[in-house]
Image: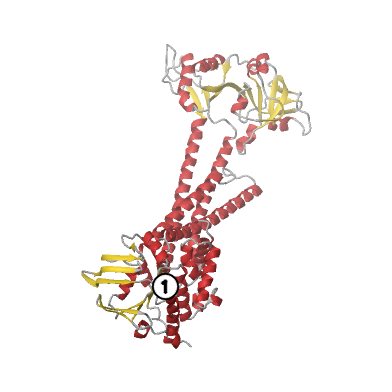
Amino acid sequence: MIEIKDLHKSYKMGSNSLHVLKGLNFSIDEGELVAIMGSSGSGKSTLLNILGMLDEADSGSYTLDGVPIKDLNETKAAKYRNKFLGFVFQSFNLINYKSAMENVALPLYYQKVPRKEREEKALKYLAQVGLKEWATHLPNELSGGQKQRVAIARAMAAEPKVLLADEPTGALDSKTSYEVMDLIQNINDKGNTILVVTHEEDIAHMCKRIVHLKDGVIVEDKKVEQVRAAQYVK
Amino acid sequence: MFNRDRWKEILEVLTSNWFRTVLTAFGVFWGIFILILLLSAGKGLENGIMQDFGDISTNTMFMWSRSTTKSYKGLPKGRSFLFKVEDVQAIRDNVPELKFISPRNELGGFNGANNVVRGIKTGGYDVYGDYPEISKQDPMTMTSGRFLNYNDIKEKRKIAIIGEGVRNGLYDKDEDVLGTFIKIQGVNFMVVGTYKKKSNDGDGEEGQKQIFVPFTTFSQAFNRGNDVGWMAITANDGTSITSLKDKIMGVVKEKHKVHPDDQRAVGHFDLYEQFQRVQSLFGALRFIAYFVGILVLLSGIIGVSNIMLIVVKERTKEIGIRRALGEDPWSIKLQILMESIFLTIISGMAGITLGALFIYGVNALLDMNGPVDMFMNPSVSLGVVVGALLILIFSGLLAGFIPAQSAIKVRPIDALRTE
């Protein structure tokens, strides 16, 4: 599903440049649930941004679902993001003046799905994350966990090939974290490919595979026994 | 463009900070209001002054003879001469671009002695010997009877057309005028028509106190022979009388043995030139109105642009999120542009509406208090309003362009990092 080869990325900070990714190689198959771990500054967010087409690599190749991702202009990148990717952010990033349902419907709106169909689909995904009754509420009327579930519903609404989650539990307490991970595991169980960036061991172990990044190189890439989050959720 | 979600969003954004939106809109509102006001005030002045020209055809000159100031062909300077009836044909033959040539003679004059008698009533009026064409050069409205015609000229009929002012002076209110006789310097004329002239200033009164009789009758009755007092000459539409006047005066100078360079032997008044001068004054006024109005509008537009920049800045993160979700950058640009145009047009329409109401009020006031000198019926044409709208749309685009550009210039990843 995802294949990267010899990925390099450096940032210019004034006169000196910071080499963040130093030649990464790995691939992710369909249906995998991968955790990317590493301390801050290890390059995990940069990697995710490149995978999310929010940022571009200096060199190396990136293939997503058989499509080589290169020479993107903004219009094309926006189209690919909309078609291939779903984002879940640490800070939820819901649009404040839109209701939960409108937030979920946004990616569909950009796909020019007719309003009626859009709303039906949005409600369906809200129901999947258990928030159907909250459809008309604004984000500031929801709790942190609920916000993240709306964000996950939004990411899923466009039926993307890959779900990218950047510290999805970073702003949540452990109980809600497990609820969110439970949701992510359930989505993965249905066959969706998911990438989770985290620095928490327990969250990483709820995935099926852990990729350890350190100073811009992969130091470890191992399959793990998945810990089901459901057991922590009563 | 006619997308419900987009409009919903535009309204959401603009109403999220009412006070700011209204303040911003006020700049544009004020600019267009001033523009409309200046233009309509200019138009009011124009209407007022054009009114003073009345219905007179403006492509006209008047020409009269004076005494020569140069000796020529053995004739001394200081010699007086008069135009003759034959001159009219000579001018017509030599200058084909002319529409009307009316030779005229006059009795009386401003504050002249009493020269008209009817029964026991008398009055001092201007009495003109005229050809029928004069009614096309200096239009009048017949209130009863008829004007002169060529049979009157040919048969030298002793008939007269009198103004409403004359009628009021010589007749009782309900008296029948047509068919009665008035005595002009001892000669009886039958009244066959009455007229009224359009004009609102002091001359208007004078204009109603004139008597027209056939030119030929006038010449015979008052011993003018072939003499012509002065001429009113109108050129064809599309040719200005100003360009023809040297040629016309050349013809009469030659006929009367006047030195061709004698500038003062033939007096003239070029109405067209005066009219053009007034016209160019209004052109300048309009230019000033547009100039000032558009500059004021421009400052309003800069205000809109400024606020849009702030709005974009405030929404940087939101724009980042939307781009991460896959919104086309063009769609974001369009959104910002439409917000800006919408704001400009709404506030501009308010300005136009209030401007129109203001003009309406001024007109009502003018109607109530009677006419004012040199000012009448201030108004703006529909063309100006449509033009103003176009200016608004354009300026909305202009105001939104830089903010829209800056909205998509920020990379989504940077936008997302903004807290």
Question: For this rendering, which residue is in front, A140 or B379?
Answer: A140
Q: Is residue B387 left or right of residue A61?
A: right
**Placement of B266 over or under A13, stated as above or below:** above
**Tag 1: residue type?**
Asn
**Residue annotated with mark 1:** A192
The image shows residue A60 at horizontal and vertical percentages of 26, 66
The image shows residue B199 at horizontal and vertical percentages of 62, 36
Q: Could you say which quadrant of the image residue A54 lies in?
A: bottom left
Q: Residues within 10 Å of mark 1 (few under 14, many from 20)?
A: many
Q: Is residue B167 left or right of residue B382?
A: right
Q: Residue at x 43, y 17 (%)?
A: B259
Question: For this rendering, which residue is in front, B322 or B235?
Answer: B322
Check the picture and name the quadrant holding the C terminus of chain B.
bottom left
Name the residue furthest left. Answer: A16
Residue B81 visible, this angle: no
Helix, strand or loop for disc 1: loop
